[in-house]
Amino acid sequence: MDDITLTRAGLIALLDAQPDLEVVGEAADGEQAVREAEQVNPDIVLMDLSMPGMGGVEATRRVVRENPPVAVIALTTFDTDEHVYGVLRAGASGFVLKSAPPEELLKAVRVVAAGHALLDPGVTMRLVRRFTERLGPVDAEPATFDSLTRRENEVIRMVAQGLSNREIGKRLSMTEATAKTHLNRSMAKLRLSSRAQVVAAAYEIGMILPGARNGTEHE
């Protein structure tokens, strides 16, 4: 049994041992993951970014596109996997380090299952900063961002800085529900499907500077 198969078996055993979780399928590569997601329609897919054949980024993009209700959590090594930025842009709801303790993985699954899109805003920001600092901003569609209202821009900036809807509402003197409404409208205009994509897109166009702290804007 190779290391990848052994790791997958360990994850299945861990998840199946939980009374509130059930493993409904498994896959050895990206293409099989896409097929399984379509056939069994799971709530969550744990996607290894290092797979033979179709990579985790493309598999995530296809799963999210072809099965909109399904949320994807990427499994990554963080320090060495340069595909993490791409998988966030592809629509993953967040990521978990392969070295994370079992309780952290279980917490991540439950958090995403409850409808929260970004597992750890602080870690995600540090990761995106790392790759934007290395690669620089990529081509984006400024006109699309120009379609946002002033308030929607403020909300997007704060999401990219790692604030929750509750924190955004408090900072902008609005309810959490109103902050969520502004975010949902912004994501619809930008054709984004997750908070993780919002973070990636904001860094892509230079809306947020790498290393910027909450409240710091790039004009």
Image (tube, grey):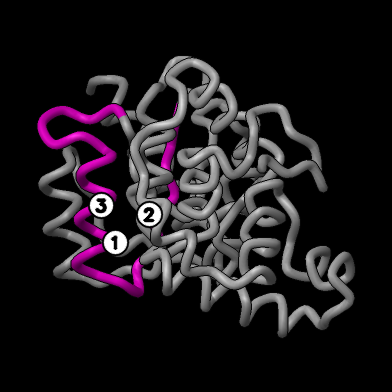
Labels 3 and 1 touching (C-beta < 8 A):
yes
Decide if residue 129 is on the left or right side of residue 13.
right
Residue at screen point 59% across, 54% down: 118
Q: Position of residue 200 (x, y in %)?
A: 49, 44
Amino acid type of disc 2?
Gly
Span shown in magenta: 50-76
Look at 45% across and 15% down and name the residue there: 80
Does the stretch in magenta take in 81? no
Is residue 114 visible to us here? no
Q: Are marks 1 and 2 in contact (CB under 8 Å)?
A: yes
Secondary structure under tag 2 reads: loop
Residue to which mark 1 is pinned = 64
Query: Residue at the location (35% across, 56% down)?
Result: 45
Q: Which residue: 50% across, 26% down? A: 132
User: What is the secondary structure assignment of the residue under circle 1?
Assistant: helix
Q: Residues within 10 Å of mark 2 (few under 14, many from 20)?
A: many
Q: Nearer the viewer, residue 114 or 93?
A: 93
Name the amino acid type tagged 1. Answer: Val
Q: Position of residue 55 (x, y in %)?
A: 20, 34
- What is the x, y in percent for residue 24? 30, 64
Image quarter in which the N terminus is found: top left
Q: Which mark is residue 142?
A: none
Q: Which residue is mark 3?
A: 61
In front: 141, or 24? 141
Residue 124's place in the image compared with 190, above or below, is above
Q: Are marks 2 and 3 in contact (CB under 8 Å)?
A: yes
Real-space Cα separation, disc 3 to disc 1, in angstroms? 5 Å
Please give the residue where the numbered disc 2 appears in the rendered image. Answer: 91
Q: As shown in the figure, which amino acid type bears the numbered disc 3?
A: Arg
Q: How many angstroms separate mark 1 from mark 2 (CA)?
A: 6 Å
